Each structure stands twice: as structure tokens, then as C-alpha cells.
Image: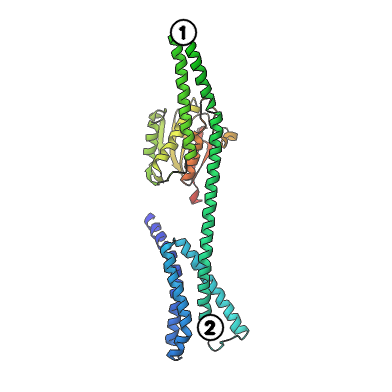
Amino acid sequence: MLEASLVEAMVLTWAKRWSLTAVGLSAIGVIVIYSFLSTDSLWRTLVNTSSPIFLSVLVAAAGVGIGWYHDADFVASVALWAVVSATVGVAINQWYVFLLGGAFPDEPFYFTMSSVSVTAAFGTATGYYYTALRRKADELEEANRLLRDKNQRLDEFASIVSHDLRNPLNVARGQLAIGRQADDREKQEEHFDAVEEAHERMERLIREMLSFTREGEEVYEPEPVRLEEVANRAAANTPISESRVEVNAKEEIRADDGRLQTVFENLFRNAVEHCENVVTVEVGTSEDCVFYVEDDGEGIPPEKREQVFEGGYSTKNDGTGFGLPIVRRTAEVHGWSVRAVEGKRKGARFEFVDETER
């Protein structure tokens, strides 16, 4: 089934890429066939068909050139313009000749072919510039969107730096000052340990903020990966015990291996840090989603299920609030959406849905 779909996609791409050339060659073929069937003299036939053939050759040559330098969808768009223009040309021609008794009533075929070739050439030129301008407009809109997203991330970054980093920094300063004044060595060590913990929190906060702001900018390299292997590898890198992770997914999906592992690590860490009674975390697949991660903890209240994906939001005093936002942004890079719902065991369930198949 997969090989058949791949062959169909290749055939469709090939047909699109050479569609404009096919339009020009089809017109040339019709003219040549009619010329052999015509009872006119060779000279008269050459004179009447030279202009349509020349224009049709230009359309076919343009198809080769455009197909060489542009993608298949670009060529198909130009070919559509050429066909529509030629169709309009035929309609106008028939209206002019047969209804109004216009010029060349004794040679309707030559007149029709001249109209078709002229309008097809016009449609090719118009379609090329229209498609090129539309592509530029789409690229500009995409660039503007990326710039808006980047500015938004910078605003979030600045806001969080000015607010969230200040707390552990103040703790470190306060504990350092108290530790310097303490006479007892043991008490000094306690305060210095608190300073170290504050620094570790700042380091983690900075690391996750950078990951959050940069996510989506790096090159995405999808490849077939096994969910079971990535999930088990992620469990080994998080505080959760590997025995508490149930992976019921033998499937392969196309994803960036490193980013997918980051998704699992954040979700496993989130389950451990926010749910005191979590016993197991399940990873699996279903007909409704690419994969899901579900725990058996307290779950997420319905009114909080969208808010948990906002940058900087956390219900823990020492939480950074970036774990789930990183998960959502990574999902979007893959063409997925992620939603938080209630699990089968009333815990939190995160489902990843492929938006490209909708």
C-alpha cells in the first residue's frame, strides 16, 4: 500500500512538472495532423499554420524551462492558466465567427488554432508572473509570521528573565550574605547549599528558556523512529523509574529523534514533579492520534488544560513552566497538535494529532 501511494505521488508530480509542455505539444500535434488531412496546397498550409505552430512551440519550450527551474506545483499553476486562457480564446472565437459572421469564415480551423495558440501563450506568460508573485507573497507572509513569532518569544523571554530569574537570584544573594555572617561552619554549609540550589534552578531555567525560544528555528530532520526505543531512552534520562513507564507502541513514526526524546522527557518529568501519587506513565498509539502519554495521577482540571501550555505557567514554586510549552512547540514543528485530556484512569493524558491528515 505504501509503495503504491509512493508511485502514485511520483506519477502525479511528473505529470504536473510537464503539464505545460504537454499543452504546447498537444496543440502542435493537432495542427500537424490537420495539416496532413487538409486539401490546401503545401504553401497555403505552411502559411496558415506557421504562426500557431511557432506560438505552440514557445509554450512547450516555456514548459521545459519552467519545469527545470521550478517545482511541479508551480508548473501546474502556469499550465492551468494556459488551458483556461486557450479555452476562453476558443469560446470568443466561436462566438465571433459563427454568431457574428466575423473574418475567416471559410477557414474556421486556422482561425481557431491561431486564437488558441495566442491565448495559450498569453495565459502562459500571465500565469508565470501571477504564480511567481503569489509565491513571493506567500514567502513574505511566512517570513512575517516567523518574525512575529520570534518577537513574541523574545517578549516572553524578556518578561520571564526579569521576573522568574529574579527570585532565585535574590535567594542566592540572601543566603550568601547570611552564610558569610554565620560563625558555625555547619550553618555556613547549609546556606551555601541553598545558594547552590538557587544557581542550579537559574541554570535550568535559562536552559529551558533558550530551548523554548529557539524551538522551531533549527533544521528539522524527520526519519523513521521507533516510539518504544525513544520513550525508553527518555525514561532513563528522567527521575521516573523505567519500571514505571509502560510503552505499548511498537510502531514507527517519522520524527526528529532528538526532539521526540525531549518531548517524552518533559512529559515524564512533568508527571513526576506535579503528581505525588503517580504510579505509572503509559505511552501508546490509537486511531485518534499519532501517540499519547498518559499518567495515573490527579489529572489536570478542564479549565487549566490550555493554560498549562503557556510559557512560564507552573503550579510548583520551583517549576520553570517551560516543559509543556516546549512540548507543544516541538509538536507544531512536526505538523502535530497536542491536547491535554482526561485519561482512562482519571490522570493527565496528552494526545498528539497529525494535522496534515485532517
The quadrant holding residue 149 is top right
* Residue of label 1: 183
Residue 301 occupies which quadrant of the picture?
top right
Neighbour tally class for label 1: few under 14, some 14-19, many 20 plus, Cα within 10 Å: few
Residue at point 45%, 8% (across, down): 184
Q: Position of residue 160 (x, y in %)?
A: 54, 32
Q: Find residue 142 and report its horizontal and vertical position in percent.
A: 52, 51
* Residue 97 horizontal side relative to residue 282, left or right: right
**What x and y, as percent, mark residue 98?**
60, 84
Q: Name the element at disc 1.
A: loop
Q: Residue at x 38, y 60 (%)?
A: 7
For this orientation, the residue located farthest to the right is 100
Closest to the observer: 143 or 259? Answer: 143
Q: Point out residue 55 in the picture as x, y percentages from the top left corner.
A: 47, 76
Quadrant of res 302: top right
Q: CA distance from mark 1 to mark 2?
A: 107 Å
Q: Determine the secondary structure under disc 2.
A: helix
Task: Tell whether label 2 touches label 1 (CB within 8 Å).
Answer: no
**Amino acid bearing label 2:** Phe
At a point 50% along the width and 20% down the height, the residue shown is: 172
Residue 159 visible at all: yes
The three-letter code of the residue at mark 1 reads Asp
* Closer to the eye: label 1 or 2: 1
76 up-or-down from 270: above or below: below
Q: What residue occupies the far top of the structure in this picture?
A: 183
Check the image and report above or below for 74 versus 209. below
According to the picture, the residue beneath numbered tag 2 turns out to be 111
